[in-house]
Image (spheres, rainbow, N blue to C red):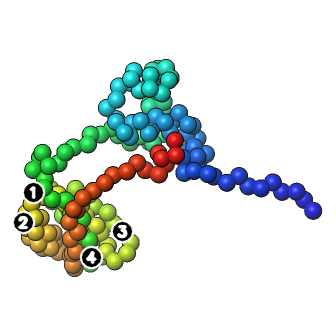
Amino acid sequence: MKNFTKPTYIQTPAFFLILLHKFDELDMQLLFELTKDASISVPILSKKLGINASVLYSRIKRLSKKKLIKKFTVDIDHSLLGIGVKANVGINRDPKFKDSIHKSFMETPEVVSISEVTGRFDIIIQVYSKNLESLHSVVIEKIGKIEGIQNTETFVELQKTNKDPVYLNNL
């Protein structure tokens, strides 16, 4: 009878990412800090992480080159721009009109994201509007009149709480 070693089980999603993509613990710490505040300066971040700034610059460049970091962005307070209502709209469509519907959504300024999904809807879009009246107008007058849209169901966001992704919680 042969002796087999027990398989090593992956304990955390972060460890899985490290194994799968060859990212080390410093990469994950860097990702965690940049996710919290992408505007942090490299000198401040290097002190916080206890590593040389030149090492940090090269790590950021490598993570960007490997496409783990796709872009650096800002978090906007949409209410200051007059956006008072955010909603998700579940949509069923005629498959023949898939491309033209997608094009229409891309041309609709109030539509900020488009997701093809499984489940009871074919698409879920996120819509930003000034108020409920303008949301109603967008859903009925713009979205509802697109050729190939069969039905819609709107879910108004009442409150939203963001949390760190699971892979960041294990650091």
The quadrant in which residue 73 appears is top left
The residues bearing labels 3 and 4 have C-alpha atoms spaced at a distance of 10 Å
The residues bearing labels 1 and 4 have C-alpha atoms spaced at a distance of 25 Å
Residue contact at pointers 3 and 1, CB within 8 angstroms: no
Residue found at x 9% / y 57%: 130
The residues bearing labels 4 and 2 have C-alpha atoms spaced at a distance of 23 Å
* Crowd tier of the residue under label 3, counting other residues whose Cα lies within 10 Å: few below 14, some 14–19, many 20 or above: few
Judge whether residue 29 can be spotted in this image.
yes
Disc 1 marks which amino acid? Lys
Judge whether residue 100 can be spotted in this image.
no
Label 4's element? strand
Question: Tag on residue 133?
Answer: 2
The residues bearing labels 2 and 1 have C-alpha atoms spaced at a distance of 8 Å
Q: Label 3 belongs to which residue?
A: 117
Disc 2 marks which amino acid? Glu
Q: Earlier in the sequence, mark 3 or mark 2?
A: 3
Quadrant where the N terminus sits is bottom right
Label 1's element? loop
Q: Label 1 belongs to which residue?
A: 130
